[in-house]
Amino acid sequence: KGYPSVDGLSLNVKAGEIVAIAGVDGNGQSELAEGIMGLRQVTGGKVSHLGDDVTRHSTREMINRSISFVPADRHRHGLLLGMRVSENTMVGYHDREPFCKWGFHFDYKAIRAHSEKLVKDYDIRAASTEVPTAQLSGGNQQKVILARELSRDPTFLLVSQPTRGLDVGAIEYIQRQILNMRDKEVGILLISLELEEVFALADRILVIYEGKIVKELIPEQTDHKEVGYYMTGGKKE
C-alpha cells in the first residue's frame, strides 16, 4: 500500500481568510491539493465544504460547488496549450450555457464575448483570444487560469505555486488578485514554496513537514527564520 503522503493533517479555512501551507517541496503539498480537488483518491480522512462531506467528489463536482483551483503545474493541469485562449477561459464550464446549448453545440459567439471580457479585465496580453494559449508568455498563461477560476465567483479557492517562474510585474498582479478575492470573503488555501509570498499574503501560516502540519504561526508574530526552522523538521519544546 505504501506510506501516506498526508498523515494526520487537519486544517480549516474560513471565509475571507488566506491560510498558507509553507514547506519544502515534496512534503505532501501536491498530494494535499490533488486530494482536495478530486484528482487523487483519498484513502482516509474527510474533506468538507460548507458543511458537506465532499471527500469522494470528482473534480467536476468540486467545480460545480463553487470551488476554484489554480494548479502548481499550469501546463499539465491548468491549460490546454494547443487550444485557443477563448476555449481555455471556459474549460470546466464548457458543457453548460451560455457556452454550450442542448448539451453538445458550442456557442462560439458567447465564448468569444466571455473570453474578450476576461482578457480585458485581467490584463491578459494576447494578440487575439483566438490564438493558441501556447503562444502566450508564462505570466499571461497564468493570468488565463486566474481569470477563468476567479470569474466563477468561488466560495473557496485553492491556489498552488501561483507565481512560480514569473516576472516581478506578473507576480505583483497575481498576488493582488488573490488579496482581492480574500476581500470578497472567499476562503483561500495557498500552497507556496516562496516564503516572501507566504508572508505577503497569509493571515495564518501552517508549516508542513513529512505530510504533517507541525506548526501554526501568525505572520505578524513570526519571521522567515522561525518558519524555515519548522520547514526543515525543527522541533521546539
Image (spheres, rainbow, N blue to C red):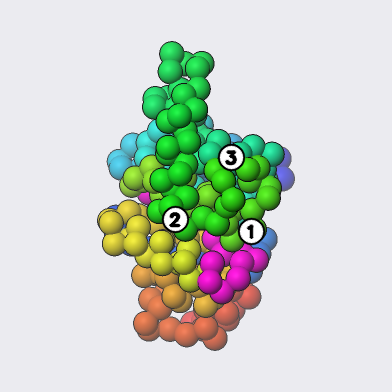
Say if residue 61 shows up in the picture.
no
Q: Which residue is identified by label 2?
A: 122
- Nearer to us in this view, 143 or 225: 143
Q: Which residue is identified by label 3?
A: 130
Task: Report how far apart the C-alphas of labels 2 and 3 lie in the structure.
Answer: 17 Å
Q: Position of residue 169 (x, y in %)?
A: 53, 71
Q: Is residue 48 left or right of residue 164?
A: left
Determine whether label 2 and label 3 are within 8 Å by CB: no
Mark toward the viewer: 3 or 1:
3
Q: Which residue sits at x=50%, y=17%?
A: 105
- Nearer to us in this view, 151 or 40: 151
Compared to 231, does 127 lie above or below?
A: above
Q: Which residue sits at x=47%, y=66%?
A: 173
Quadrant of the rendering where the N terminus is positioned: top right
Q: Position of residue 148 (x, y in %)?
A: 47, 45
Task: Of the two numbered discs 1 and 2 on the same chain, state the one appearing first in sequence.
Answer: 2
Q: Is residue 12 left or right of residue 184?
A: right
Q: Position of residue 34 (x, y in %)?
A: 57, 45
Q: Which residue is identified by label 1?
A: 138
Q: Position of residue 43 (x, y in %)?
A: 57, 38
Identify residue type, mark 1. Answer: Gly
